[in-house]
Image (cartoon, rainbow, N blue to C red):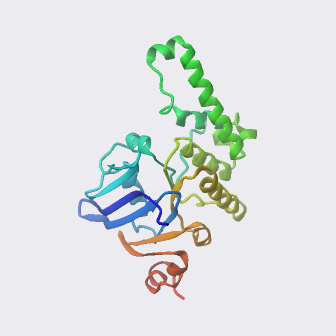
């Protein structure tokens, strides 16, 4: 049975003046699928993420997201609107609030789901308190699910590197995305932290039924996790296929994997 495509990018190009960073790229991600986007440094991977999440608009092409059974064109939407539609992301360089607690970092991601009017917020009406309790309950569940409950009241900046990465992923998950874009989540991790990250990503798919688009240079992690792989080189799709097909592709070996 063919899975429903939830993200579909068609002939997407991004130019910065005379530089073509992404050139006529088409890719898709299906429901609850894990797709990897790999390639050499400067291949256009993070630029593609920025186009998908509204940080930078595409010069041409279309990006659509399936929302309530309908395809919505998100090509030129603002970042917060795309997040509301169901795409969330992490970054190469961890972006947490280091002087806020772990609990507060996750809580701040829920504000779009439980917004109240200014009167209710100032007066602390019963409805405000009900929504506040729902938010706290959801945060506590996420903390427990991803083994952050014991450090919930610690400052995020005091956590070990691996836990900071975990926190960033959980905070992105708190927005209830249909598609989670992970930009080099294993960067800077030791083998033990990478193994824990692999287990975490498996749990995201199994328990939260979220599709994942992954940029990663750790090929063992990519080959373990990905169902399909897109290879970018100089802003263009060089190859696409299963991990087994990509391993055998001579163009990929020459351009990225470094030889036989």
| Residue 98 as seen in the image, left or right of residue 86 | right
Of all residues, the one furthest to the front in this rendering is: 1
| Residue 209 as seen in the image, left or right of residue 80 | right
On the question of residue 94 being in view, the answer is: yes
User: Where residue 58 appears, x then y in whole percent?
Assistant: 29, 55
User: Where residue 77 appears, x then y in whole percent?
Assistant: 32, 45
Q: Who is closer to the viewer here, 248 or 23?
A: 248
Of all residues, the one furthest to the bottom in this rendering is: 260
Quadrant, the C terminus: bottom right
User: Where residue 236 appears, x then y in whole percent?
Assistant: 35, 71
Q: Who is closer to the viewer here, 232 or 33?
A: 33
Q: Who is closer to the viewer here, 88 or 57?
A: 88
Q: Residue at x 47, y 75 (%)?
A: 241
| Residue 187 as seen in the image, left or right of residue 233 | right
Q: Residue at x 47, y 33 (%)?
A: 112
The quarter holding residue 237 reads: bottom left
On the question of residue 47 being in view, the answer is: no
The quarter holding residue 230 reads: bottom left
Q: Is residue 72 above or below residue 21?
A: above
Of all residues, the one furthest to the right in this rendering is: 150
Q: Is residue 203 above or below residue 121?
A: below
Q: Who is closer to the viewer here, 260 or 89?
A: 89
Q: How many marks?
A: 0
Q: Residue at x 37, y 59 (%)?
A: 8
Q: Residue at x 59, y 21 (%)?
A: 130
């Amino acid at each position: 049975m063919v899975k429903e495509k939830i993200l579909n990018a068609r002939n997407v190009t991004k130019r910065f003046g005379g530089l073509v960073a992404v050139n006529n790229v088409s890719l898709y991600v299906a429901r609850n699928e894990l797709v990897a986007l790999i390639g050499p440094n400067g291949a256009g991977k993070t630029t593609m993420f920025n186009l998908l999440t509204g940080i930078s608009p595409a010069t041409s092409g279309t990006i659509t997201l399936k929302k309530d059974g309908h395809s919505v064109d998100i090509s030129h939407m603002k970042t917060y609107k795309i997040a509301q539609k169901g795409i969330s992301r992490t970054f190469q360089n961890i972006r947490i609030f280091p002087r806020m607690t772990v609990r507060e970092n996750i809580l701040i991601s829920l504000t779009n789901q439980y917004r109240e009017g200014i009167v209710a917020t100032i007066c602390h009406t019963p409805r405000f308190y009900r929504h506040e309790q729902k938010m706290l309950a959801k945060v506590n569940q996420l903390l427990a699910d991803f083994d952050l409950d014991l450090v919930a009241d610690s400052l995020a900046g005091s956590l070990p590197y691996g836990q900071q990465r975990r926190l960033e992923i959980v905070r992105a998950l708190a927005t209830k995305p249909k598609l989670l874009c992970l930009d080099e989540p294993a960067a800077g991790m030791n083998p033990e932290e990478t193994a824990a990250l692999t287990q975490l990503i498996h749990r995201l798919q199994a328990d939260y039924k979220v599709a994942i688009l992954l940029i990663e240079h750790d090929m063992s992690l990519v080959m373990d996790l990905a169902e399909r792989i897109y290879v970018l080189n100089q802003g263009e799709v060089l190859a696409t296929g299963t991990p087994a097909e990509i391993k055998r592709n001579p163009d990929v070996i020459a351009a990225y994997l470094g030889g036989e």
